Image (cartoon, coloured by chain):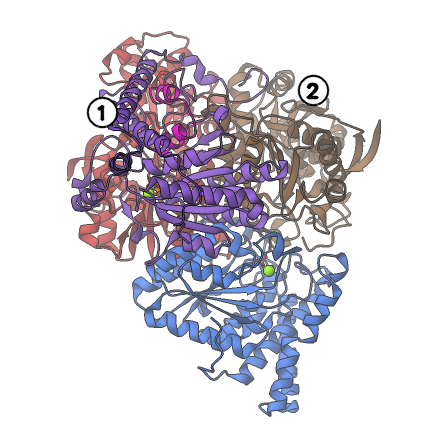
Chain colours: A purple, B brown, C blue, D red
C-alpha cells in the first residue's frame, strides 16, 4: 500500500539540507576520483539522495543501521562522520575503518551505523539479527537495513525476512530500487510484472512503496513504517524507486555503453530530486534562496574540510595490516 | 570437584553455566528445544532459561548465521547448533565474509562477534556422503576464525565455556561418536583455554598428533605399541586454530617422529598443515619422514560394507606408528577387543540417526 | 487457487494400487528395520502416499524428477525399481546407487528419476536446472521437484523459483506440507497465517493447493499444473497438505514424546488416505473387494521379492569405496 | 599456429571454440552479456551464440549453481562465471554437497556433472577483505572436484577447453592481474591436460612450486637469483587438484630444496600440502627445510598503505630462495624495475574495479 496521507510533518529544511549535502559530497568524490588517490572501488548514490536523506531523518539517533556496497549516503545520513568516511576512502589511518575497509566497509557505532559490507545482501540477515537482539532487550529501537533491488534475489534476503516475520522483529527493510544491478536490468533477474513490495507482502511482512525521489513521501512512508514497528507489529519493508546517475562503480557517466539509454537517463535527470525539492521549498517559501545559498556554502566548506582532513591524514603503517584480527590478547 | 558426565551432558552443562553467568547468551538452532534436544546436548536449557533464550529456527542456515552475527553486534552471545556440519555449508558466506572479517575490516572498532557455532560431525550407520563431512581445515584456513575440537567430556565443557566467553567467532566441532562417552568433568565455570593442546600420553619414540575422536583412537593404539616396546607422545590438539605450535613442535623435537592423524580428507588438511610446519620448523630434528593418517580422499559411502576400513582407527594408527619405527606389529588385539559393529559408536546405538 | 472441477479423469484403480503398494512397502521397512540390517537413516512416507501416487501417475514417463530425504515413495511412483531401492537401503551392490548413497541418495535415470539428496532444499535448484535444459531443448518434458514444508525456508528455494519464473521454465514444484520439520511445527518456522502457496504466488509463479490425502484432487491439480507448464505458461507450484504417521526418521511411532499430540495423530489416522480411497472405490463399485484382495496379494509378493532380492544380494567389496569418484580414466 | 593474445581474450576464445564444438555448452553468470563482458573474457559470445546460450542471471549464486548442476544432468555443459571468487561462498553447499559428490554417491550411474565455474581472484586497488580471497585449498580439499589455476594466456585457453570437455565439475580460478597479460596462444581446439604441471624454468639449486600469478612472480625472481649464481626449477602447478605429484616430487628429488608459493593464506593451503607431501615422500632427498611463501594469515586490507608488502612478489621469492641456500641477495633491481604502483597490475589500470 502506498502512503499518501500526511501522517507526520516532514522536516523540510533538514531534508533539503541533507540532500544537498549528500549530493555535494558524492559529486566531489566523482570530481576528484581521477586524481587516483582514492584507490578503492566507489559506488556513488548521486541521483538517489532523497531516500538516504529522508530515511536518515526518520530514524531516531538510537536506531541501528547496516548497508551494502553503495553506503556512503546511508552512512552520512545516519550521522556518520564525513571526514572519517573520506579518510577511509583515501586509505588513511583516520578512516572510519582505519584503512582496513575502504569505501565498501564502513562503520560508526557511535551513531548506530553498525557496518556496511560488499557482498550483495550480506548484511540483511545481520540487520535482522540486530532486530532480534533489540526485541529481546525490549527497547523501542529499530534496526534498519539498506539494500538494492538485486539483493532481493539472494536467498538470505528471504531467510532473513521470513525470520523477522516469524518473530515480529523490529526491523525496517529499505529497498532502493534503481532498476539496475550493475548493468543488468530487472527484466533478466526478476519475473515480468513482479513488484518487489508485493512479493514481500506475500512473505507476511507489511510492505509499502513509493517514489524514492520524493523526499517527503519517503519520509512519511518511513515514519509510518517505523511507528508500526515500534508499536510491536513486526517488521516492515519499504521499496523506493529511484535512479543512479553515474556508473555502477566509479565516477563516470556511462549511458553511452549501451545497457541503458541516454533518453532514460535524461528523463530521470530532468526530475532530479535535489533540484526539484529545492525548487519546491523555494516556491512554497519554506526557504529563501539566500538560505539555500548559505546552506550550499556551509556544505561546500564541510566537504572541502573533509577532503583536507582525508588528504592530510597519515597513512597507516604497513604493520597495521597485522593487527585487529582477533579480539583479546595482542589482537592477532 | 569432578563428577562423571557424558560428553553430551558436558555440553549441556557448559551451556547452562554460560547462560547463568551472562543473560545475553542465546542458544538456538534446529531442534535445540525439541524432545531429543540435539542428542541430549541442550537438555534442560529451555526449562531453565525459557523460550526467549532457547529457541528453534526456520531451516535457514545462511540467514540464521547472519542473524546470530547481528544479534552479537548488539551485545548478545550466540550459540548456534547444527545437527550435522554438512548443513552449515549453506552458511559459509556469512561465517567467512562477515563473522571472520568483521572485526578486522572495521579496524577493530566494532562490537565483538561473539558467536559460537556447534557443528556435529556425523559418522557411521550409513550417514553417507552428505552427513559425514569433516571440514575443520576449511575453517582453520580462514584468518579470523577460531576452531576447537574437544575429545573428552571435560574438554567439551571447558572449551565450550571458553568459546562462549571469547570475543571472536568460534567453531566448535563435536563428534557424534563421543556424545555418549563418559569422563570426569569438573564442576562450575571450568574453562579449557582455546589454543592450548593437551599431551594425553607421554612417550619417546614418536609424536602422534590428534584431534576429536582420533585422540581416543590413538589412546587405544598405545597398549599395542607398548607391547612392542614403543612409546608415543599423544598430543590432542583441542584447538586447530590457533594451533598450539609450542606443544606440537616441542614434542616433535623431542621424539623426532611425527604421525598426524585427522578425521578429514587428507589434501590440504590440518594434518597436512602439521606435517608441513614440522618439516619446515623441525627439519633437523626429524629422524624419519613425517606422516599423516586421514580419511581416504573420497566422499564417505553409505553401505557398512564400504566403510569397514574407511575411517582411521586404533589399529591403523598403531600399524602406521610401528612402521615409522621400522617395525610391524600385531594389531589383532585391538580389532578383537571391539564388541560392537564397526559402523556404530557402541552397542547402545541402534539407529536411525 | 484450488482446482475443484474435474478436468481430467483420474486413473482410479491405478491410484489405489499405487497407494497400496507404497504403503505396503514402507510398512515392511518399518517392520523389519529393527533387525538392524538396514543400517542407514530411513525417512518413511507412511500417511503421505496419496501425493506420491497421484503425482507419479500424473507425470509422463519422459518427465524428470528429483527429491529430498523422504524420497522412497517419489522414487517408486516415478517408476524406480523396488528391489534396487531396497537393496540400496540394505547397502548392497545391487542397490540403485550401488551402496554409495543409502536411503537418502537414490537415482534411476532410466525412469527419469534424476536423484534425491539429503540436504533440505538441495535439489530444488537442481530440478530447476533440469527445467532450464528442457526449455532449451524445446521438449514437452517437465522437471518435477518434490520437497517438504521446511524446504521453502531455505534461500535456494526462492532463488530457484525466482529463476524459473524469470525464464518461464517447465518445472513443477510439489510441496508436501505435513506441518512438521523433524519435531518443529510450522509456527516456529514460518509467520502466522502464512499460506505457502500464497507466498509462492507472490513470487510470480502459478500456485495451487489442496488436500494431499485426496488422491483424485492431487491428480487433477497436478495434471492441471502440468498442462499449463507444457503449454508454455512457465513453472507451477502445488502444495498438498498431508501427515506423516511415524517418526521423522526411523520406523517408530513417536506421538508420545511430546512434539505433537496423540489426538492430532488419531484425527489424521482416522481419515487415512489409503483406507479412505479403498472404501470410496469399493463404494463406487470401481473395484471389487476381490480385486483389492488380489492387488494386495500381488503387492505383498512384490515387496517380499524385493526384500529377498535385497537380503540375498552381495555387499560391495570394500574396495568399491574407492571408485566412481571421477568420470574418465580409472574413475578415481 | 600461435598468435599473441591476452589472457582475457584466450578465455573468450576457448569459450567460443567449445560453444562451437558442442551446442550444449551454455555460458552464464552476472555480466557475461553486459557491455564490459566480465573484463572482456566473454567478448563476442552473445553475438555469436545468442541469448539462449549466453545469458545473465539473478543475483542468486547458490541457486544458479544448482541450476547449472541440473542443466548438466540433462546433458548441458555449463560454464558459470563469478566476477569475484568471494561471491561464490554463497554457493558452496551446491558445489560440495551436490556437484562434487553427485557421481560418487549415485554409484557412478548419473549423467556427468559437466560444470565449469570460473572464479576471478581479485587483488589490488582496494579490493579489500571481501573481494580478494583465494580459496583454492578449500576446493582442493574436496574429493570430486577438479581445480585449475592457469598462469598464462595459452594455459588459460588450454585449461578452459579441457575443463569444458571434462566430465567432472571443474573450478577454474583466474587472476584479475593476468587478464591483460599477453602471450602466444595456439589456434583452434587447443587443450592443456588437467592434472599436468608445467616446468617453466629449469635449475638445480631449488624447486619453486607456483600457481597462477605466482608463476610470473617466480619467473621475475629468476634473473636476480641467476646473478647470484643460483638456478631453480619453477614448477607451475596449473592444476591444484588432481595434483601432478610426479613432476613436483621429481623436481624436488632433483634439487633437494622446495619453496612452495601460494596466492592464499598459508594455513592448510595448497602450499602446505606440497610441503607436507614433499616431506613425507622425499624426506631423504631434502637438503634443507622445505618452505612455503604465502599471503599473511590475515584478511586482505584495503588501504594501499597496508598492502605494499602484503602479497608475495618476485623480490620475496628471490629473497626466500636465496636464504634457503644460505645466501642473502640484493633484490633492489626487481623493485626498481617496476614502473606501476604496487596495487595495480599495470599502468593501464586506473580503477575503479
Ligand atoms: C554475492 C554478490 N554477488 C555479486 C556481487 C557483485 N555486485 C556488486 S554490487 C552489485 C549490484 C547490486 O545491485 P543492487 O542490489 O540493485 O544495488 P545497486 O548497485 O543498484 O545500488 C553486484 C551484482 C557482489 N558484490 N556480491
Ligand atoms: C540444510 C539442512 N538442514 C537441516 C537438515 C536436517 N533435516 C533433515 S530432514 C529435515 C526436515 C525437513 O522437513 P520438511 O522439508 O518439511 O520435510 P519432511 O521431513 O516433513 O518430509 C531437516 C531439518 C538437513 N538435512 N539439511
Ligand atoms: Mg539496483
Ligand atoms: Mg514437513
Does the stretch in magenta take in D284? no
Task: Give the magenta part as a residue range.
Answer: A67-91
Number of labels in the image equals 2
Assess disc 1: are there few (<14), some (14-19) or many (≥20) residues with their C-alpha within 10 Å of its C-alpha.
few
Chain for numbered disc 2: B
- State the SS at label 2: loop
For the residues tagged 2 and 1, is the chain the same? no
Which residue is labeled 1 in the image?
A31
Does the stretch in magenta take in A82? yes
Residues under labels 2 and 1: Cα distance?
A: 69 Å
Q: Residue at x 71, y 38 (%)?
A: B331
C28 on left or right of D48:
right
Tell me, for residue D125, which label it has, or none: none
From the Cβ of disc 1, is ligand 1 less than 8 Å away?
no
Q: Nearer the viewer, residue D304 or C61?
A: D304
- State the SS at label 1: helix
Any part of residue B270 in sight: yes
Tell me, for residue B204, which label it has, or none: 2
Assess disc 2: are there few (<14), some (14-19) or many (≥20) residues with their C-alpha within 10 Å of its C-alpha.
some
Q: Quadrant of residue C285?
A: bottom right
Q: Is residue B175 above or below residue A306?
A: below
Residue D25 screen position, x and y as percent: 29, 54
Residue D222 screen position, x and y as percent: 29, 17
Residue A196 screen position, x and y as percent: 39, 52
Any part of residue B135 in sight: no
Chain for numbered disc 1: A
Residue D130 screen position, x and y as percent: 41, 31
Ligand 3 positioned in quadrant: top left
Q: Is residue D287 above or below residue D299?
A: above
Q: Residue at x 34, y 60 (%)?
A: C133
Q: Are marks 2 and 1 in contact (CB under 8 Å)?
A: no
Amino acid at each position: 500500500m502506498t502512503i499518501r496521507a500526511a501522517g507526520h510533518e516532514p522536516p523540510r529544511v533538514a531534508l533539503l539540507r541533507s540532500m544537498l549535502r549528500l549530493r555535494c559530497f558524492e559529486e566531489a568524490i566523482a570530481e576528484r576520483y581521477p586524481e587516483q588517490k582514492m584507490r578503492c572501488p566507489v559506488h556513488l548514490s548521486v541521483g538517489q539522495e532523497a531516500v538516504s536523506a529522508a530515511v536518515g531523518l526518520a530514524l531516531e539517533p538510537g536506531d541501528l543501521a547496516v548497508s551494502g556496497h553503495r553506503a556512503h549516503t546511508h552512512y552520512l545520513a545516519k550521522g556518520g562522520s564525513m571526514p572519517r568516511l573520506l579518510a577511509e576512502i583515501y586509505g588513511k589511518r583516520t578512516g572510519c575503518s582505519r584503512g582496513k575497509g575502504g569505501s565498501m566497509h564502513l562503520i560508526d557505532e557511535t551513531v548506530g551505523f553498525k557496518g556496511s559490507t560488499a557482498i550483495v545482501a550480506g548484511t540483511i540477515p545481520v540487520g535482522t539479527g540486530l532486530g532480534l537482539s533489540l526485541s529481546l532487550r525490549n527497547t523501542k529501537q529499530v534496526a534498519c537495513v539498506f539494500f538494492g533491488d538485486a539483493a532481493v534475489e539472494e536467498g538470505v534476503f528471504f531467510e532473513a525476512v521470513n525470520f523477522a516475520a516469524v518473530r515480529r522483529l523490529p526491523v525496517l527493510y529499505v529497498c532502493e530500487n534503481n532498476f539496475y544491478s550493475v548493468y543488468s536490468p530487472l527484466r533478466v533477474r526478476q519475473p515480468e510484472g513482479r513488484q518487489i513490495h508485493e512479493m514481500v507482502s506475500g512473505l507476511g511482512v507489511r510492505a509499502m512503496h513509493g517514489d524514492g525521489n520524493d523526499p517527503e513521501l519517503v519520509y512519511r512512508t518511513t515514519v509510518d513504517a517505523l511507528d508500526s514497528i515500534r508499536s510491536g507489529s513486526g517488521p516492515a519493508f519499504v521499496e523506493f524507486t529511484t535512479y543512479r546517475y553515474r556508473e555502477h562503480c566509479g565516477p563516470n557517466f556511462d549511458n553511452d555503453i549501451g545497457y541503458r539509454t541516454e533518453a532514460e537517463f535524461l528523463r530521470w535527470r530532468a526530475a532530479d530530486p535535489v533540484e526539484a525539492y529545492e525548487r519546491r521549498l523555494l516556491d512554497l517559501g519554506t526557504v529563501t534562496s539566500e538560505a539555500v545559498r548559505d546552506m550550499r556554502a556551509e556544505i561546500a566548506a564541510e566537504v572541502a574540510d573533509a577532503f583536507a582532513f582525508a588528504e592530510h591524514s597519515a597513512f597507516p603503517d604497513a604493520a597495521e595490516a597485522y593487527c585487529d584480527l582477533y579480539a583479546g590478547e595482542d589482537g592477532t | 570437584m569432578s563428577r562423571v558426565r557424558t560428553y553430551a551432558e558436558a555440553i549441556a552443562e557448559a551451556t547452562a553455566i554460560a547462560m547463568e553467568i551472562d543473560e545475553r547468551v542465546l542458544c538456538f538452532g534446529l531442534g535445540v528445544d525439541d524432545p531429543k534436544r540435539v542428542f541430549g546436548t541442550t537438555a534442560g536449557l529451555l526449562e531453565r532459561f525459557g523460550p526467549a533464550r532457547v529457541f528453534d529456527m526456520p531451516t535457514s542456515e545462511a540467514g540464521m548465521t547472519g542473524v546470530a552475527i547481528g544479534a552479537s553486534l548488539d551485545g548478545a552471545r550466540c550459540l548456534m547448533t547444527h545437527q550435522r556440519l554438512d548443513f552449515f555449508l549453506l552458511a559459509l558466506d556469512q561465517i567467512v565474509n562477515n563473522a571472520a572479517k568483521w572485526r578486522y575490516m572495521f579496524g577493530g572498532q566494532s562490537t565483538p562477534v561473539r558467536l559460537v557455532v556447534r557443528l556435529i560431525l556425523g559418522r557411521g550407520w550409513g550417514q553417507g556422503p552428505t552427513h559425514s563431512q569433516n571440514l575443520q581445515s576449511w575453517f582453520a584456513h580462514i584468518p579470523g576464525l577460531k576452531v576447537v575440537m574437544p575429545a573428552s567430556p571435560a574438554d567439551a565443557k571447558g572449551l565450550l565455556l571458553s568459546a562462549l566467553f571469547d570475543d571472536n567467532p568460534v567453531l566448535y566441532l563435536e563428534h557424534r561418536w563421543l556424545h555418549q562417552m563418559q569422563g570426569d568433568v569438573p564442576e562450575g565455570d571450568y574453562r579449557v583455554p582455546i589454543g592450548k593442546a593437551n599431551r594425553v600420553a607421554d612417550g619417546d619414540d614418536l609424536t602422534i598428533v590428534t584431534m576429536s575422536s582420533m585422540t581416543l583412537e590413538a589412546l587405544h593404539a598405545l597398549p599395542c605399541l607398548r607391547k612392542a616396546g614403543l612409546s608415543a607422545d599423544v598430543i590432542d590438539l583441542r584447538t586447530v586454530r590457533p594451533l598450539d605450535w609450542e606443544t606440537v613442535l616441542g614434542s616433535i623435537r623431542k621424539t623426532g617422529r611425527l604421525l598426524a592423524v585427522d578425521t578429514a580428507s587428507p589434501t590440504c588438511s590440518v594434518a597436512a598443515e602439521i606435517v608441513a610446519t614440522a618439516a619446515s620448523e623441525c627439519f633437523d630434528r626429524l629422524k624419519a619422514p613425517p606422516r599423516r593418517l586421514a580419511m581416504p580422499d573420497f566422499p564417505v559411502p553409505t553401505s557398512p560394507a564400504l566403510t569397514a576400513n574407511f575411517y582411521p582407527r586404533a589399529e591403523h594408527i598403531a600399524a602406521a606408528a610401528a612402521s615409522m619405527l621400522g617395525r610391524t606389529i600385531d594389531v589383532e588385539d585391538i580389532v578383537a577387543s571391539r564388541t560392537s559393529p564397526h559402523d556404530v559408536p557402541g552397542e547402545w546405538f541402534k539407529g536411525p540417526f
